[in-house]
Image (spheres, rainbow, N blue to C red):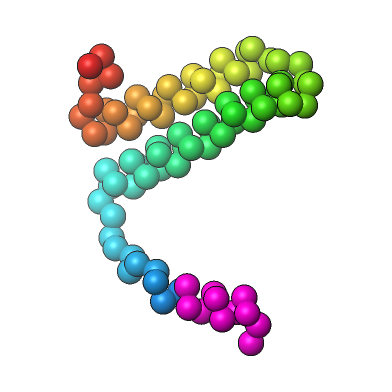
Amino acid sequence: MSMFNDYQYEASKTFKPTKQLMPEQVRLLDWATGLGGESGEVLDIVKHGIFHGEEFNKMELAKELGDVLWYVSAIATTCDIDLGD
């Protein structure tokens, strides 16, 4: 067995058991992972514009920021958080 196999086996002993999720939890998890993905897309646009010398595409950035806002709104609504506060 390799060192990585040993590590993988030992690490698997620390996994938390799975549990049944409620529909609201599934939606919240879906939206939180979506937010992470969209935030990464915003970061990628900014990174490419600054560090890779690519043309900064404002329309693409605006689209991705709109997606981020949608996920923030969905999460806030699910958690009964008023974005106006």
Tell whether 10 sits left or right of 29.
right
Q: Is residue 49 magenta?
A: no
Which residue is pictured at 22% across the width and 16% down the height?
A: 85
Query: On screen, 12 above or below 66?
Result: below
Q: Where is residue 30 in the image (x, y as percent from the top left)?
A: 41, 42
Farthest bottom residue in view:
1
Front residue of 56/30: it is: 56
Q: Quadrant of residue 59?
A: top right
Q: Give the range drawn in magenta.
A: 1-11
Q: Quadrant of residue 69?
A: top left
Dominant secondary-structure state across the stretch colored magenta: helix
Which residue is pictured at 52% across the width and 31% down the height?
A: 39
Which residue is pictured at 64% across the width and 23% down the height?
A: 46
Quadrant of the rendering where the N terminus is positioned: bottom right
Q: Position of residue 6 (x, y in %)?
A: 56, 81
Q: Position of residue 57 (x, y in %)?
A: 69, 15
Q: Where is residue 51 in the image (x, y as percent from the top left)?
A: 74, 26
Query: On screen, 79 above or below 45?
Result: below
